[in-house]
Amino acid sequence: MSEVKVNKISPRSGTTVTLGDSGDTFTLASGVSLTGVNATFSGDLTVDTNTLKVDSTNNRVGIGTASPSEKLFIEDSGNTRIEVKSTGSTTATSIGTINNAGSLGRILMYSTGIGAYGSLGAGEVAFYSNTAGMSIMNDNASGVIKFSMQSGAEKMRIESDGDVLIAKTSNSLGTVGIELASNGKVSATRSADPAMSLNRLSTDGQILDFRKDTTTVGSIGSNNGVRLGIGTSDTGIKFWEGDGILPANPASTFADRDNAIDLGYSSNRFKDLYLGGNIYLGGTGSANALDDYEEGTWTPAFSRASSAPTVTHSRQTGTYSKIGQTVIAFFDMVVDSYSGGGGDYRMVGLPFATNMSISNGGFSRSVIRAATLMSTDFRVNGDSSFVNASNVTLKNYNSSGGEVAVSPSSSGRLTGYIIYTTSS
């Protein structure tokens, strides 16, 4: 084989220079470079046996090896490795390694002064700066991918089932943090503060849209800038800043909807309603206000106006209904015996004091079962002493329709009802 030494080859522009034949070897001496030309190699290119090898047969490139086994194979002392050195200091500091000895599968990127993080384990990817950093690690044992800060505190993870946990390491709802489940469920837990804030800018309207099979079934939104509205289609309510819950139309930015929405249904009723104010029925004026309704029991008793007698009762039952200021009181009283006392005969123990101001005012005829205690029909009347009292005076009709004091026998039964008004 001949040896040709050429000091300089300077072909004209556009000239193609072919050197040697198949099997020839060309060696560039140390310090010699090829510049300003395009070089085409039909075979392998080797730049120092363990520095760079281009395998033309297998279309592979090897760095640090003459026998690359992959398309790009980088090797250093038998361990696949990429390492970038910082030249900003006297002693070069590693700022990036891949698959170095003892930690196969590791990728590290960090700057000067963070070399301690080179001890991260196999399968871990880590990125660091001088003052803060983040590590990404795949836990091969559990299949969990963990995202941590330089301090070591884990901030997020992707679990093997695809769930994403943010600021928590457990998918328990009792643990503070956010869970984005692979089945589409979103859970958020926060201690002592709201777990979610939703903000709509500019105009009123829907803030949260609820859908079933992509069709809207309800929404939560704003009205008048400060009112919360909830509803579906055109039926909804809104919470008024003047201490009220008002009917509203969700389709019209929760606008007022007067006299159009029912509360309950004939076959789908609410149970109890507790009110401290009035119910307005059939109108909005004071005459339409029902401010009280009550049902209960009371104990009727036989007595006299001036001084109480000695009485033995074998029955004393009473019930009442109070609607507004009107009281309807039913009674059933049996007197076994009485003695003494003075003045008109009375029934005492009414459930509410009366507010009658005139005799006979506000009473209806009672249904009397007289037996021997009373004679035939009689009237239960008020008199001047009856105002704000809890009793009624018992009087009979006379033959001309006037009133006379009753003269009961020593025993008997009195049943009936009275209707009167009270002051509240």
Image (cartoon, rainbow, N blue to C red):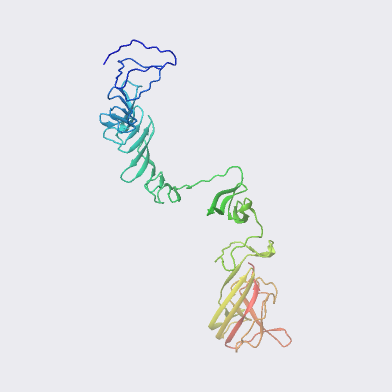
- The x and y percentages for residue 259 are 66, 60
Q: Which residue extends farthest right?
A: 400
> From the viewer's perspective, is 46 left or right of 165?
left
Q: Residue 385 at x, y = what percent?
A: 66, 74
367 vs 130, left or right, is right
Task: Report which quarter residue 280 is drawn in.
Answer: bottom right
Q: Camera-side residue: 353 or 240? A: 240
Say if residue 349 shows up in the picture. Answer: no
- Outermost residue toward the top? 7
Looking at the picture, tell me which residue is in the foreground, 342 or 350: 350
For residue 77, which quarter of the picture? top left
> Taking 350 as reference, is 112 left or right?
left
Residue 45's place in the image compared with 71, above or below, is above
Horizontally, residue 119 falls left or right of residue 192, namely left
Report which quarter residue 86 is drawn in: top left
Q: Quadrant of the N terminus?
A: top left
Please state the horizontal and vertical placement of residue 15, each as a whole percent of the image: 42, 16
Quadrant where the C terminus is found in the figure: bottom right
Residue in the foreground of this view, choosing between 371 and 328: 328
| Residue 66 image offset from top left, x and y in percent | 28, 27
How many numbered marks appear? 0
Instruction: Identify whether 36 is placed above or below 356.
Output: above
The reply to whether residue 202 is visible in this rendering is yes
Front residue of 17/291: it is 17
